[in-house]
């Protein structure tokens, strides 16, 4: 019987670039990554079962699994699935929180609750995911319906880039929002991946998970 690989990271597709960057920067080898489509965020009720399917598929090939999703609008059902499957995930409600860090994100939210957040991924795909995804490009009258209650756009940047800052600033102007920039780097994403790679808490042995689910 072939030896199992040590760790699988199950990640949101919106984190693919950042996850691979962390693995390179941290010099982590022998870790595989399986990304689910970023568009699942449009239907968060589908995320838990999609993650469950990946965990169960991993049991024959991997010793451990760690999930790189926040709650992401699943209303706690993702955590319920992970408890049933014996797996754990990165802490936080969403990627904004674990990029900024829980304390800093809480401070941002307290400073202005009516904030709309972008990451590097969302800046790169702003037109496709926001303007076209919400139909604003075809129906400009929808803009105030979606964004009329927001006051500012906060760009949480993983990599320093004048080009991305300019794109995010332009996105804020298109939405009629005040622009706020915060460089976060990889934040708690890096910390969590490195901890999982050390076989610490969060990388659950899949043999135990399989027994629990039998």
Image (cartoon, helix red, strand yellow):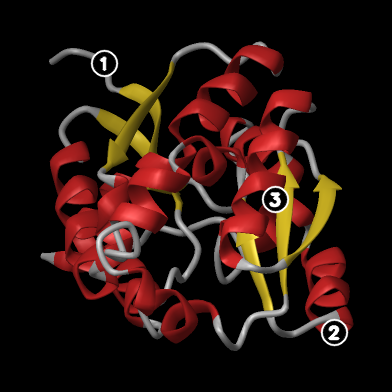
Quick check: 198 above or below 148?
Answer: above
Q: Secondary structure at mark 2?
A: helix
Instruction: Kindly indicate the quadrant of the structure image that contains residue 149.
Output: bottom right
Which of the two labelled residues, at mark 1 and mark 3, occupies the earlier sequence position?
1
User: How busy is the neighbourhood of tag 3: few (under 14 within 10 Å), some, or many (20 plus)?
Assistant: many
Q: Nearer the viewer, mark 2 or mark 1?
A: 2
Is residue 29 something that shows in the picture?
Answer: yes
Residue visible at 60% across and 37% down?
193
Disc 2 to disc 3: CB gap under 8 Å:
no
Q: Where residue 114 sits in the image (x, y, percent)? A: 70, 83
Report the mark closest to the observer, 1 or 3. Answer: 3
Spatial CA distance of label 2 from label 3 is 17 Å
Disc 2 and disc 1 in contact, CB within 8 angstroms: no
Q: Residues within 10 Å of mark 1 (few under 14, many from 20)?
A: few
Q: Please report the residue visible at 78 percent of the width from the left and 78 percent of the height from the top.
A: 109
Instruction: Tell which of 1 and 63 is nearer to you.
Output: 63
Q: Is residue 209 left or right of residue 93?
A: left
List x then y, in percent, for residue 188.
72, 48
Q: What quarter of the picture does the N terminus occupy?
A: top left
- Report the Cα–Cα distance between label 2 and label 1: 49 Å
Q: Which mark is residue 200?
A: none
The residue wearing badge 1 is 3
- Residue 16 is left or right of residue 46, and the answer is right
Disc 3 secondary structure class: helix
Q: Disc 2 designates what residue?
A: 110
Specify the quadrant of the image occupied by residue 168.
top right
- Decide which of 208, 159 is in the foreground and name it: 159
Asked if residue 161 can be seen in this view, the reply is: no
Marker disc for residue 99: 3
User: What residue is shown at x 46% (from left), y 46% (from top)?
Assistant: 126
SS for callout 1: loop
């Amino acid at each position: 019987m072939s030896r199992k690989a040590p760790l699988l990271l199950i990640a949101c597709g919106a984190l693919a670039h950042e996850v691979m960057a962390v693995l390179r920067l941290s010099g982590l080898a022998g870790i595989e990554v399986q990304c689910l489509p970023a568009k699942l965020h449009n239907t968060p009720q589908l995320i838990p079962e999609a993650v469950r399917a990946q965990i169960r598929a991993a049991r024959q090939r991997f010793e451990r699994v760690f999930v790189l999703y926040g709650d992401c609008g699943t209303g706690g059902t993702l955590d319920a699935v992970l408890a049933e499957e014996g797996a754990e995930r990165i802490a936080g409600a969403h990627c904004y929180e674990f990029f900024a860090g829980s304390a800093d994100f809480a401070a941002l939210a307290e400073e202005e609750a009516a904030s709309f957040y972008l990451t590097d991924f969302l800046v790169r795909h702003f037109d496709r995911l926001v303007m076209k995804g919400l139909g604003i490009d075809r129906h400009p009258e929808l803009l105030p319906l979606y964004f009329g209650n927001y006051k500012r756009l906060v760009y949480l940047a993983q990599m320093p880039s004048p080009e991305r800052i300019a794109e995010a600033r332009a996105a804020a102007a298109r939405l009629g929002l005040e622009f706020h920039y915060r460089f976060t780097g990889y934040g708690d994403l890096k910390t969590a991946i490195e901890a999982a790679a050390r076989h610490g808490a969060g990388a659950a042995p899949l043999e135990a998970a399989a027994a629990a689910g039998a």
